[in-house]
Image (cartoon, rainbow, N blue to C red):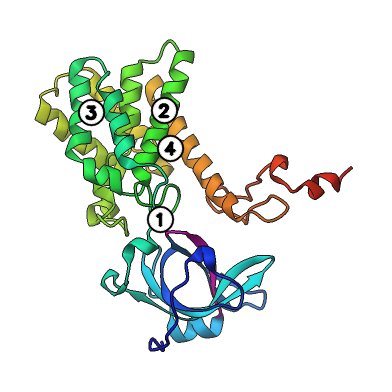
Amino acid sequence: MNESLSILPICIKDLRPGDNILQCFRLGTKELRKTKSGHDYLDLVFSDATGSVTGKVWADVLRKWGHAFASGDYVKVEGRVETYRDKIQVVVEKIRKVDSSEVPDIDSLVKKSSQDPQVLMAELKGIAGTLQPLQLSNLVLHLLETHADAFMSLPAAQMVHHAYRSGLIEHVTAVTRKVMAVLPLENDINPNIAIAGAILHDIGKIRELNAEGNGRTPEGRLIGHVSLGAQMLRDAAHAVGVTASAWLTELEHILLSHHGETQFGAPVRPFTREAVLVHFIDNLDAKLKIMSEALESAEPDGFAPYNKWLEGKAFAGSNALRQEDHDAGT
């Protein structure tokens, strides 16, 4: 890679057709695909703090430079910006993985939540402070306060949803709000257990994801955040002296079952009303976020490109279409 070229980095939101680039990106998704003629190519998504852009590594470049990089890595890319179906993409000419120490400004590549994590943490602590019994409140507050820095900085996932700095606390706060919105409609659900479960359901991600949010820790890969979260809950229960509390097992059940099905990483399925509620609200919030992010790349007809997490193409809705598109059918 001819890194002696003097090309100033361009924010993704400012990329224009015809631009030549030589700069670092954060790698989002990476998929090895085949052209109609059977040649391998890479379909990539590059990101920085301002947005994301598709990248294509065609067969000749792929053979020369390989693909020794993975989602979440920082990569240095040389290429050109072109338009395809009215959208810009980067046609990669050279690419390699780089260490974070080689990136001139890490913050410029890291997307952040639009919400203030300090404000969100204060909201969660305020809610936790109202829980009954007092021992439950103390347990939830203990976990929030012990892991506050990581809780406020980590993403909620590597690439599926809320995959940006402070995405974890944004997601958890949204799940907690949604659970609280449903509770007045369901008299048989224990609100204290449900709210505590909503706040703590993803606590294991603090040990699953590394401090930079760039990949998973060894125990995250080998154990996963569901089981790690249950371990953290039991450790905290010992620390605050509530191991004999009857509600502790129900709260642990929410953490262990919030993925719903064993094929999605849940050791057990949800078997309490509170666990069912947290599972479906967690899934709802994740799916809505996936859809919102997919629709950032919607075509003029309102459909986003195929999204493997949605298993289809998200649609923005008729109200999002241009007026001439509405008129076309009349």
Q: Residue at x 10, y 31 (%)?
A: 239
Q: Residues within 10 Å of mark 1 (few under 14, many from 20)?
A: many
Q: Is residue 54 magenta?
A: yes
Front-lying residue, 253 or 108: 108
Asked which secondary structure carries label 2, the reply is helix
Q: Is residue 94 left or right of residue 243?
A: right
Q: CA distance from mark 3 to mark 2?
A: 16 Å
Location of mark 3 (residue): 140
Which percent across, then down, holds residue 6? Answer: 42, 85
- State which mark lies toward you, 2 or 4: 2
- State which mark lies toward you, 4 or 3: 3
Q: What is the quadrant of residue 159 in the picture? A: bottom left
Q: Residue at x 23, y 57 (%)?
A: 218
In terms of sequence position, does the residue under pointer 3 or pointer 2 come before the other? 3
Location of mark 4 (residue): 261
Q: CA distance from mark 1 to mark 3?
A: 28 Å
Q: Residues within 10 Å of mark 4 (few under 14, many from 20)?
A: some
Asked which secondary structure carries label 1, the reply is loop
Q: What is the quadrant of residue 177 in the picture? A: top left
**Rendered-image quadrant of the N terminus:** bottom left
Task: Say which amino acid is labelled 4.
Answer: Glu
Location of mark 1 (residue): 111
- State which mark lies toward you, 3 or 2: 2
In terms of sequence position, does the residue under pointer 1 or pointer 3 come before the other? 1
Location of mark 2 (residue): 177
In terms of sequence position, does the residue under pointer 2 or pointer 4 come before the other? 2
Which percent across, then down, holds residue 216? Answer: 29, 56
Q: Is residue 57 magenta?
A: yes
Which percent across, then down, holds residue 226? Answer: 31, 41
